[in-house]
Amino acid sequence: TVEVPSLSKVYEEYFNIGAAVNLTTIKSQKDLLRKHFNSITAENDMKFIEIQPAEGKFTFEKADQLAAFAKEHGMKMRGHTLVWHNQTPEWVFQNADRETLLQRMKNHITTVMQRYKGTIFCWDVVNEAVTDEGPELLRSTKWLEIIGEDYIEKAFEFAHEADPDALLFYNDYNESNPEKREKIFKLVKSLVDKGVPIHGVGLQAHWNLVNPSLEDIRTAIERYVSLGLKLHLTELDVSVFNFEDKRTDLTEPTHEMLELQAERYHQVFQLLRQYQNHITSVTFWGAADDYTWLSDFPVRGRKNWPFLFDENHQPKESFWKVVHY
Ligand code: XIL
């Protein structure tokens, strides 16, 4: 039998290795998480709708259990997420003018961040505010509609006041797409130029076997690095299905998929290691192939196998390529 090295130990000198978790996986994947990961993110349990489903009614039970897991096992924890257009309850925007909504935003950010002060070292303060298509910079959301463009800087200001020690991130997907990349760059640069307290850019990194290209990933990293901020990969997964692949009948990944995935992970981590002064955390959006949100997205019920560990928590070819570089 071969010794399986700890992923987070192998990468100790480079960056933290994180996993998104929930109350099920901290049990079912406990040993794997403890061995290979030194950071966690709540997959859903710290989102607005989970933590404040009704005004002033804070429900921290699940989030607290995840925070306790991190503490108990000496792991770091990323906070995800405070201001987003998804998984935010209706009441937040009801009968809200600018001042009311700012007040609700501030109250949420302050209450949540102060509760996890000292446990959560960084927060995705604003998630996915940039639009994918068209000439517009910002996604049209209730936050934008009711408050105006400065909702983003307000969120960062409230966050900084709530926990001056926390690292504050702007987080987005399609971050390596050239058009979206420039929009994200423009938004974050405007925040930096205004002196808004922002410390990092989160690259969600929901990738597949071919997209985005390694060159596009490199260019995106270079571009964000030029802002002088930290970078985190916040939600890394490598889907075995490329965009045009519509198959829904696979019960296991093909040999070819696993080979391509291993080569892909090999190249990606080789690239990430070159930015060790800038990339300080790499979080997978899960830990092993027995559980991934991709088995329901973008195709409902289509199983996917995006991680370094298989359904039985055994290292895949991808894992070996990442640790034996
Ligand atoms: C996803 C979760 O994994 C799912 O369980 C949930 O149903 C929807 O949200 N970008 C993000 C994450 O910032 O919060 C999303 O997580 C995945 C895309």
Image: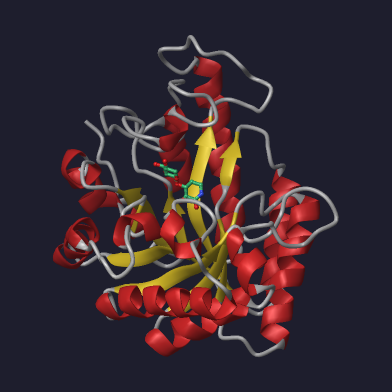
- At x 43%, y 70%, the residue is 123
Q: Is residue 26 above or below residue 38?
A: above
List the single residue furthest toward the front. Answer: 95
Residue 176, x across and y down, in percent: 70, 52
Residue 271, x across and y down, in percent: 62, 54
Foreground pick, 181 / 35: 181
Q: Is residue 188 left or right of residue 251?
A: right
Q: Is residue 59 above or below residue 316?
A: below
Q: Is residue 18 left or right of residue 64?
A: right
Q: Quadrant of residue 65?
A: bottom left
Foreground pick, 48 / 214: 48
Foreground pick, 86 / 223: 86
- At x 61%, y 32%, the residue is 209
Q: Is residue 54 left or right of residue 32?
A: right
Is residue 143 at least partly visible in the picture? yes
**Image quarter in which the N terminus is found:** top left
Residue 321, x across and y down, in percent: 48, 40
